[in-house]
Image: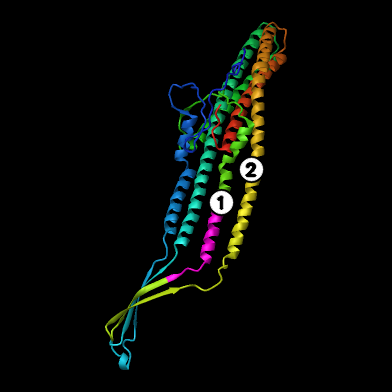
Amino acid sequence: MTVMLFKRKIKKPIGYRFCALLIGISLSLSAVAEEPAARPQVISLADAITLTLENHPDLKTLVSQQRVLQGRIEQAGVGERPQIDFMVEDALGTGEHSGLNRMQSTLTFSWLLQQAQIDSRVSAVKSEADTLVLQKHITALDLSAEVAKRFIDILVKQQRLKLNQLALQQAKDVVAAISKRAQAGKSSGVEIQLAKAELIRRELAVEDVEHELNASQYQLASLWGAPGTQYQLNGNLLNIPAVPPVEEQLARLKQNPRLQQFGSAQRIAQSQMELARIDAKPQWQFTAGVRRYEASDDFGVVAGVSIPWGDSNRNAGTLAALQARQDVLASEQTALMQTLDAQLYVLLQEMAHSQHVINTVQTAIVPTLEQALTEASNAFEQGQLSYNQYSEVRRELLSAQSQLLEAFESLHLQHIEIQRLTGTSISQ
Protein backbone atom coordinates (compact mmCIF):
# COMPACT_ATOMS: atom_id res chain seq x y z
CA MET A 1 0.00 0.00 0.00
CA THR A 2 1.31 3.42 -0.92
CA VAL A 3 1.24 6.28 1.59
CA MET A 4 0.91 9.79 0.11
CA LEU A 5 0.59 12.63 2.59
CA PHE A 6 1.28 15.71 0.46
CA LYS A 7 0.83 16.76 -3.14
CA ARG A 8 3.94 16.36 -5.24
CA LYS A 9 3.99 19.82 -6.71
CA ILE A 10 4.10 22.94 -4.56
CA LYS A 11 1.51 25.41 -5.70
CA LYS A 12 2.24 29.11 -5.75
CA PRO A 13 1.77 30.34 -2.16
CA ILE A 14 -1.49 32.09 -1.54
CA GLY A 15 -1.80 35.03 0.85
CA TYR A 16 -0.28 34.15 4.21
CA ARG A 17 -0.33 36.55 7.10
CA PHE A 18 0.36 36.47 10.77
CA CYS A 19 -2.82 37.88 12.28
CA ALA A 20 -2.85 39.89 15.54
CA LEU A 21 -5.99 41.93 15.02
CA LEU A 22 -5.45 44.42 17.84
CA ILE A 23 -1.89 45.29 16.75
CA GLY A 24 -2.23 45.31 12.97
CA ILE A 25 -0.48 42.00 12.27
CA SER A 26 -2.21 39.20 10.31
CA LEU A 27 -1.65 35.59 9.39
CA SER A 28 -4.25 33.32 7.82
CA LEU A 29 -4.19 29.65 7.06
CA SER A 30 -7.30 28.62 5.17
CA ALA A 31 -8.66 25.20 4.27
CA VAL A 32 -11.43 23.36 6.01
CA ALA A 33 -10.40 20.34 8.06
CA GLU A 34 -12.55 17.27 8.49
CA GLU A 35 -15.81 17.90 10.34
CA PRO A 36 -16.65 15.34 12.99
CA ALA A 37 -20.20 14.26 13.48
CA ALA A 38 -20.63 16.43 16.57
CA ARG A 39 -19.77 19.55 14.54
CA PRO A 40 -17.70 21.41 17.16
CA GLN A 41 -16.86 25.08 16.78
CA VAL A 42 -14.61 25.76 13.78
CA ILE A 43 -11.77 28.15 14.70
CA SER A 44 -9.38 29.81 12.28
CA LEU A 45 -6.02 31.22 13.31
CA ALA A 46 -7.46 34.75 13.23
CA ASP A 47 -10.27 33.61 15.54
CA ALA A 48 -7.82 32.00 17.97
CA ILE A 49 -5.67 35.14 18.11
CA THR A 50 -8.68 37.42 18.59
CA LEU A 51 -10.03 35.27 21.43
CA THR A 52 -6.62 35.27 23.12
CA LEU A 53 -6.09 39.02 22.84
CA GLU A 54 -9.56 39.67 24.22
CA ASN A 55 -9.31 37.30 27.18
CA HIS A 56 -5.69 36.71 28.18
CA PRO A 57 -4.98 38.01 31.72
CA ASP A 58 -1.59 39.49 30.76
CA LEU A 59 -3.27 42.01 28.47
CA LYS A 60 -6.03 42.70 30.99
CA THR A 61 -3.32 43.51 33.54
CA LEU A 62 -1.76 46.04 31.18
CA VAL A 63 -5.14 47.64 30.57
CA SER A 64 -5.53 48.08 34.33
CA GLN A 65 -2.04 49.58 34.51
CA GLN A 66 -3.05 52.06 31.83
CA ARG A 67 -5.86 53.25 34.09
CA VAL A 68 -3.34 53.62 36.90
CA LEU A 69 -1.13 55.83 34.75
CA GLN A 70 -4.11 57.85 33.60
CA GLY A 71 -4.81 58.62 37.24
CA ARG A 72 -1.18 59.57 37.78
CA ILE A 73 -1.29 61.92 34.79
CA GLU A 74 -4.36 63.58 36.20
CA GLN A 75 -2.74 63.91 39.62
CA ALA A 76 0.51 65.27 38.15
CA GLY A 77 -1.48 68.18 36.74
CA VAL A 78 -2.52 69.27 40.21
CA GLY A 79 -0.27 71.94 41.71
CA GLU A 80 0.19 73.29 45.21
CA ARG A 81 -2.89 75.01 46.60
CA PRO A 82 -2.86 78.78 46.94
CA GLN A 83 -3.08 80.02 50.54
CA ILE A 84 -5.32 82.56 52.25
CA ASP A 85 -3.88 83.99 55.47
CA PHE A 86 -5.48 86.22 58.07
CA MET A 87 -3.37 87.95 60.68
CA VAL A 88 -4.30 90.21 63.63
CA GLU A 89 -1.71 92.56 65.20
CA ASP A 90 -1.69 95.09 68.03
CA ALA A 91 -4.83 93.75 69.69
CA LEU A 92 -5.71 92.68 73.21
CA GLY A 93 -2.52 94.13 74.60
CA THR A 94 -1.94 96.68 77.37
CA GLY A 95 -2.14 100.44 77.51
CA GLU A 96 -3.06 102.04 74.25
CA HIS A 97 -3.05 98.58 72.60
CA SER A 98 -5.69 97.18 74.89
CA GLY A 99 -8.90 95.95 73.35
CA LEU A 100 -9.31 96.32 69.58
CA ASN A 101 -8.83 100.05 69.19
CA ARG A 102 -5.29 99.81 67.76
CA MET A 103 -5.78 96.45 66.03
CA GLN A 104 -4.45 95.88 62.54
CA SER A 105 -5.90 92.95 60.58
CA THR A 106 -4.34 91.62 57.35
CA LEU A 107 -5.92 89.28 54.80
CA THR A 108 -3.49 87.90 52.17
CA PHE A 109 -3.63 85.51 49.23
CA SER A 110 -0.42 83.60 48.31
CA TRP A 111 0.41 81.45 45.30
CA LEU A 112 3.39 79.76 43.69
CA LEU A 113 4.59 80.13 40.11
CA GLN A 114 4.63 76.38 39.40
CA GLN A 115 3.20 75.83 35.92
CA ALA A 116 6.57 74.77 34.55
CA GLN A 117 6.89 72.07 37.23
CA ILE A 118 3.35 70.87 36.57
CA ASP A 119 3.91 70.60 32.83
CA SER A 120 7.17 68.74 33.38
CA ARG A 121 5.59 66.25 35.80
CA VAL A 122 2.72 65.57 33.40
CA SER A 123 5.17 65.08 30.53
CA ALA A 124 7.20 62.56 32.56
CA VAL A 125 4.15 60.44 33.43
CA LYS A 126 2.89 60.59 29.84
CA SER A 127 6.23 59.19 28.71
CA GLU A 128 5.69 56.27 31.09
CA ALA A 129 2.23 55.78 29.59
CA ASP A 130 3.78 55.62 26.12
CA THR A 131 6.11 52.89 27.34
CA LEU A 132 3.14 50.93 28.66
CA VAL A 133 1.48 51.16 25.25
CA LEU A 134 4.60 49.63 23.71
CA GLN A 135 4.60 46.91 26.38
CA LYS A 136 1.00 46.15 25.50
CA HIS A 137 2.02 45.94 21.85
CA ILE A 138 4.89 43.57 22.71
CA THR A 139 2.66 41.37 24.86
CA ALA A 140 0.00 41.20 22.15
CA LEU A 141 2.67 40.37 19.56
CA ASP A 142 4.17 37.62 21.73
CA LEU A 143 0.75 36.15 22.50
CA SER A 144 -0.19 36.21 18.82
CA ALA A 145 3.03 34.40 17.95
CA GLU A 146 2.39 31.85 20.70
CA VAL A 147 -1.12 31.20 19.39
CA ALA A 148 0.17 30.84 15.84
CA LYS A 149 2.88 28.37 16.92
CA ARG A 150 0.41 26.25 18.87
CA PHE A 151 -2.00 26.42 15.95
CA ILE A 152 0.69 25.13 13.58
CA ASP A 153 1.69 22.48 16.12
CA ILE A 154 -1.86 21.10 16.15
CA LEU A 155 -2.05 21.06 12.35
CA VAL A 156 1.25 19.18 12.24
CA LYS A 157 0.10 16.63 14.80
CA GLN A 158 -3.14 16.11 12.90
CA GLN A 159 -1.11 15.31 9.78
CA ARG A 160 1.28 13.14 11.79
CA LEU A 161 -1.71 11.24 13.18
CA LYS A 162 -2.97 10.58 9.65
CA LEU A 163 0.50 9.46 8.62
CA ASN A 164 0.75 7.04 11.55
CA GLN A 165 -2.75 5.75 10.92
CA LEU A 166 -1.80 4.97 7.32
CA ALA A 167 1.35 3.23 8.54
CA LEU A 168 -0.78 1.27 11.00
CA GLN A 169 -3.09 0.16 8.23
CA GLN A 170 -0.07 -0.90 6.19
CA ALA A 171 1.22 -2.95 9.13
CA LYS A 172 -2.16 -4.68 9.42
CA ASP A 173 -2.15 -5.47 5.71
CA VAL A 174 1.36 -6.88 5.96
CA VAL A 175 0.40 -9.12 8.90
CA ALA A 176 -2.59 -10.40 6.93
CA ALA A 177 -0.44 -11.02 3.83
CA ILE A 178 2.27 -12.86 5.76
CA SER A 179 -0.35 -14.97 7.54
CA LYS A 180 -1.69 -16.11 4.17
CA ARG A 181 1.82 -16.85 2.96
CA ALA A 182 2.58 -18.79 6.13
CA GLN A 183 -0.50 -20.91 5.61
CA ALA A 184 0.76 -21.66 2.10
CA GLY A 185 4.20 -22.46 3.47
CA LYS A 186 5.86 -19.45 1.83
CA SER A 187 6.71 -17.51 5.04
CA SER A 188 8.26 -18.48 8.35
CA GLY A 189 6.90 -17.93 11.82
CA VAL A 190 9.71 -15.43 12.41
CA GLU A 191 8.33 -13.10 9.77
CA ILE A 192 4.86 -13.30 11.32
CA GLN A 193 6.23 -12.35 14.76
CA LEU A 194 8.29 -9.49 13.30
CA ALA A 195 5.23 -8.17 11.46
CA LYS A 196 3.10 -8.38 14.62
CA ALA A 197 5.77 -6.51 16.62
CA GLU A 198 5.78 -3.80 13.94
CA LEU A 199 1.99 -3.62 14.15
CA ILE A 200 2.14 -3.10 17.91
CA ARG A 201 4.71 -0.30 17.48
CA ARG A 202 2.46 1.41 14.95
CA GLU A 203 -0.50 1.16 17.32
CA LEU A 204 1.59 2.79 20.07
CA ALA A 205 2.70 5.54 17.67
CA VAL A 206 -0.93 6.36 16.85
CA GLU A 207 -1.86 6.40 20.53
CA ASP A 208 1.09 8.66 21.38
CA VAL A 209 0.12 11.23 18.76
CA GLU A 210 -3.52 11.15 19.88
CA HIS A 211 -2.49 11.98 23.45
CA GLU A 212 -0.14 14.76 22.27
CA LEU A 213 -2.87 16.19 20.04
CA ASN A 214 -5.38 16.32 22.90
CA ALA A 215 -2.83 18.05 25.12
CA SER A 216 -1.97 20.60 22.43
CA GLN A 217 -5.63 21.41 21.80
CA TYR A 218 -6.15 21.92 25.54
CA GLN A 219 -3.11 24.23 25.74
CA LEU A 220 -4.27 26.32 22.79
CA ALA A 221 -7.77 26.84 24.21
CA SER A 222 -6.27 27.71 27.62
CA LEU A 223 -4.69 30.81 26.04
CA TRP A 224 -8.14 32.39 25.73
CA GLY A 225 -9.38 30.95 29.02
CA ALA A 226 -11.46 28.06 27.68
CA PRO A 227 -9.42 24.88 28.30
CA GLY A 228 -11.25 21.67 27.47
CA THR A 229 -13.38 23.33 24.78
CA GLN A 230 -14.14 21.09 21.82
CA TYR A 231 -13.25 22.78 18.54
CA GLN A 232 -12.03 22.09 15.03
CA LEU A 233 -9.19 24.03 13.45
CA ASN A 234 -9.56 25.63 10.05
CA GLY A 235 -6.09 25.49 8.53
CA ASN A 236 -3.82 23.87 5.97
CA LEU A 237 -0.05 23.43 6.18
CA LEU A 238 0.23 23.39 2.39
CA ASN A 239 -0.44 27.14 2.22
CA ILE A 240 3.21 28.04 2.67
CA PRO A 241 4.49 31.64 2.67
CA ALA A 242 7.01 32.98 0.20
CA VAL A 243 10.45 33.90 1.50
CA PRO A 244 10.44 37.71 1.98
CA PRO A 245 13.32 39.85 0.64
CA VAL A 246 16.21 40.09 3.07
CA GLU A 247 16.87 43.83 2.76
CA GLU A 248 13.19 44.69 3.13
CA GLN A 249 12.87 42.68 6.33
CA LEU A 250 16.08 44.07 7.81
CA ALA A 251 14.70 47.57 7.18
CA ARG A 252 11.43 46.63 8.91
CA LEU A 253 13.36 45.39 11.92
CA LYS A 254 13.47 48.98 13.22
CA GLN A 255 9.73 48.68 13.83
CA ASN A 256 10.35 46.05 16.50
CA PRO A 257 8.55 47.39 19.59
CA ARG A 258 11.41 46.25 21.83
CA LEU A 259 13.71 48.64 20.02
CA GLN A 260 11.08 51.35 20.28
CA GLN A 261 10.97 50.73 24.03
CA PHE A 262 14.52 52.00 24.34
CA GLY A 263 13.53 55.21 22.59
CA SER A 264 10.61 55.56 24.97
CA ALA A 265 12.87 54.94 27.98
CA GLN A 266 15.23 57.62 26.71
CA ARG A 267 12.33 60.05 26.44
CA ILE A 268 11.38 59.24 30.03
CA ALA A 269 14.92 59.97 31.16
CA GLN A 270 14.86 63.23 29.20
CA SER A 271 11.58 64.24 30.86
CA GLN A 272 13.02 63.44 34.27
CA MET A 273 16.08 65.53 33.47
CA GLU A 274 13.89 68.46 32.51
CA LEU A 275 11.87 68.07 35.69
CA ALA A 276 15.08 67.98 37.76
CA ARG A 277 16.30 71.19 36.09
CA ILE A 278 13.02 72.96 36.77
CA ASP A 279 12.89 71.74 40.37
CA ALA A 280 16.38 73.11 40.91
CA LYS A 281 15.18 76.60 40.02
CA PRO A 282 13.69 78.66 42.87
CA GLN A 283 9.92 78.78 42.99
CA TRP A 284 8.76 82.33 43.51
CA GLN A 285 5.85 82.85 45.85
CA PHE A 286 3.71 85.97 45.56
CA THR A 287 1.48 87.43 48.23
CA ALA A 288 -1.16 90.12 47.94
CA GLY A 289 -3.83 91.37 50.33
CA VAL A 290 -5.38 94.19 52.30
CA ARG A 291 -4.80 95.53 55.79
CA ARG A 292 -7.32 97.32 58.01
CA TYR A 293 -6.33 99.89 60.62
CA GLU A 294 -8.97 100.07 63.37
CA ALA A 295 -7.57 103.25 64.88
CA SER A 296 -8.10 105.31 61.74
CA ASP A 297 -10.70 103.14 60.09
CA ASP A 298 -8.47 102.92 56.99
CA PHE A 299 -7.42 100.16 54.57
CA GLY A 300 -4.08 99.52 52.91
CA VAL A 301 -2.73 97.15 50.30
CA VAL A 302 0.00 94.67 51.21
CA ALA A 303 2.09 92.68 48.69
CA GLY A 304 5.22 90.58 48.78
CA VAL A 305 7.36 88.04 47.02
CA SER A 306 9.35 85.12 48.46
CA ILE A 307 12.40 83.83 46.55
CA PRO A 308 14.11 80.67 47.89
CA TRP A 309 17.80 81.16 48.50
CA GLY A 310 20.36 78.54 47.59
CA ASP A 311 22.43 76.90 44.89
CA SER A 312 20.56 76.28 41.62
CA ASN A 313 22.80 73.24 40.94
CA ARG A 314 21.44 71.18 43.81
CA ASN A 315 20.12 68.53 41.35
CA ALA A 316 23.42 68.19 39.49
CA GLY A 317 23.90 64.60 40.71
CA THR A 318 20.46 63.59 39.54
CA LEU A 319 21.03 65.18 36.15
CA ALA A 320 24.35 63.39 35.76
CA ALA A 321 22.78 60.04 36.66
CA LEU A 322 19.95 60.54 34.17
CA GLN A 323 22.39 61.52 31.42
CA ALA A 324 24.40 58.37 32.12
CA ARG A 325 21.16 56.38 32.01
CA GLN A 326 20.48 57.71 28.53
CA ASP A 327 23.94 56.62 27.41
CA VAL A 328 23.32 53.14 28.81
CA LEU A 329 19.97 52.89 27.00
CA ALA A 330 21.55 53.98 23.72
CA SER A 331 24.24 51.28 24.04
CA GLU A 332 21.68 48.61 24.94
CA GLN A 333 19.53 49.62 21.97
CA THR A 334 22.50 49.25 19.62
CA ALA A 335 23.38 45.86 21.09
CA LEU A 336 19.79 44.61 20.74
CA MET A 337 19.60 45.87 17.17
CA GLN A 338 22.74 43.94 16.27
CA THR A 339 21.38 40.77 17.90
CA LEU A 340 18.00 41.03 16.20
CA ASP A 341 19.63 41.81 12.86
CA ALA A 342 21.68 38.60 13.01
CA GLN A 343 18.70 36.59 14.25
CA LEU A 344 16.47 37.86 11.46
CA TYR A 345 19.07 37.16 8.78
CA VAL A 346 19.52 33.58 10.02
CA LEU A 347 15.75 33.02 10.06
CA LEU A 348 15.44 34.24 6.48
CA GLN A 349 18.20 31.85 5.40
CA GLU A 350 16.60 28.97 7.30
CA MET A 351 13.24 29.76 5.73
CA ALA A 352 14.76 29.59 2.25
CA HIS A 353 16.41 26.27 3.17
CA SER A 354 13.13 24.84 4.49
CA GLN A 355 11.44 25.73 1.25
CA HIS A 356 14.23 24.00 -0.68
CA VAL A 357 13.87 20.89 1.51
CA ILE A 358 10.11 20.82 0.91
CA ASN A 359 10.57 21.07 -2.85
CA THR A 360 13.26 18.37 -2.93
CA VAL A 361 11.53 15.88 -0.66
CA GLN A 362 8.11 16.46 -2.18
CA THR A 363 9.08 16.31 -5.84
CA ALA A 364 12.03 13.91 -5.80
CA ILE A 365 12.50 11.77 -2.69
CA VAL A 366 8.88 10.84 -1.89
CA PRO A 367 7.93 9.93 -5.49
CA THR A 368 11.09 7.80 -5.79
CA LEU A 369 10.35 5.93 -2.57
CA GLU A 370 6.71 5.49 -3.57
CA GLN A 371 7.84 3.81 -6.75
CA ALA A 372 10.29 1.71 -4.75
CA LEU A 373 7.50 0.67 -2.36
CA THR A 374 5.27 -0.33 -5.25
CA GLU A 375 8.00 -2.52 -6.71
CA ALA A 376 8.89 -3.89 -3.27
CA SER A 377 5.24 -4.82 -2.63
CA ASN A 378 5.08 -6.74 -5.89
CA ALA A 379 8.37 -8.47 -5.19
CA PHE A 380 7.31 -9.33 -1.63
CA GLU A 381 4.03 -10.85 -2.81
CA GLN A 382 5.95 -12.96 -5.32
CA GLY A 383 8.40 -14.11 -2.66
CA GLN A 384 11.33 -12.29 -4.25
CA LEU A 385 11.91 -9.97 -1.28
CA SER A 386 12.31 -10.76 2.39
CA TYR A 387 10.16 -9.19 5.07
CA ASN A 388 13.11 -7.19 6.44
CA GLN A 389 13.88 -5.74 3.02
CA TYR A 390 10.22 -4.88 2.46
CA SER A 391 9.94 -3.25 5.91
CA GLU A 392 13.04 -1.18 5.27
CA VAL A 393 11.48 0.33 2.12
CA ARG A 394 8.29 1.16 4.03
CA ARG A 395 10.29 2.76 6.84
CA GLU A 396 12.26 4.84 4.35
CA LEU A 397 9.05 6.20 2.82
CA LEU A 398 7.58 6.93 6.24
CA SER A 399 10.79 8.71 7.26
CA ALA A 400 10.72 10.85 4.11
CA GLN A 401 7.10 11.80 4.70
CA SER A 402 7.92 12.70 8.31
CA GLN A 403 10.84 14.81 7.07
CA LEU A 404 8.49 16.60 4.69
CA LEU A 405 6.04 17.28 7.51
CA GLU A 406 8.84 18.65 9.70
CA ALA A 407 9.99 20.92 6.86
CA PHE A 408 6.48 22.38 6.51
CA GLU A 409 6.36 22.96 10.26
CA SER A 410 9.80 24.63 10.30
CA LEU A 411 8.87 26.93 7.43
CA HIS A 412 5.71 28.15 9.14
CA LEU A 413 7.42 28.62 12.53
CA GLN A 414 10.32 30.51 10.95
CA HIS A 415 7.86 32.81 9.18
CA ILE A 416 5.96 33.47 12.40
CA GLU A 417 9.18 34.35 14.22
CA ILE A 418 10.21 36.72 11.41
CA GLN A 419 6.89 38.54 11.77
CA ARG A 420 7.32 38.74 15.54
CA LEU A 421 10.79 40.25 15.12
CA THR A 422 9.74 42.84 12.55
CA GLY A 423 6.43 43.63 14.23
CA THR A 424 4.75 43.86 10.82
CA SER A 425 2.65 41.61 8.61
CA ILE A 426 4.44 39.84 5.78
CA SER A 427 2.44 39.62 2.56
CA GLN A 428 3.26 37.53 -0.49
Circle 2 packing at 10 Å, graded few (<14), some (14-19), many (20+), is: some
The image quarter containing residue 159 is: top right
Q: Position of residue 237 (x, y in %)?
A: 56, 24
Q: Quadrant of residue 348?
A: top right
Determine which residue is flagged by label 2: 337
Where does residue 104 sit, x and y in percent of width and height? 32, 83
* Residue at the (43%, 58%) spot, across then down: 77
Q: Residue 423: within the magenta? A: no
Q: How many marks on residues?
A: 2
Q: Amino acid at mark 2?
A: Met
Q: Which residues are magenta?
A: 268-285
In the picture, which quadrant includes the C terminus? top right
Q: In the rendered image, which residue does mark 1 sit on?
A: 265
Using a 10 Å C-alpha cutoff, classify the residue at mark 1 as few (fewer than 14 neighbours), some (14 to 19) or many (20 or more). Answer: some
- Cα gap from disc 2 to disc 1, whole angstroms: 16 Å
- The image shows residue 307 at horizontal and vertical percentages of 48, 72
Residue type, numbered disc 1? Ala
Using the image, determine if residue 364 lies above or below residue 60: above
Query: Dot 1 lies on which element?
Result: helix
Horizontal side of residue 61 vs 416, given as left or right: left
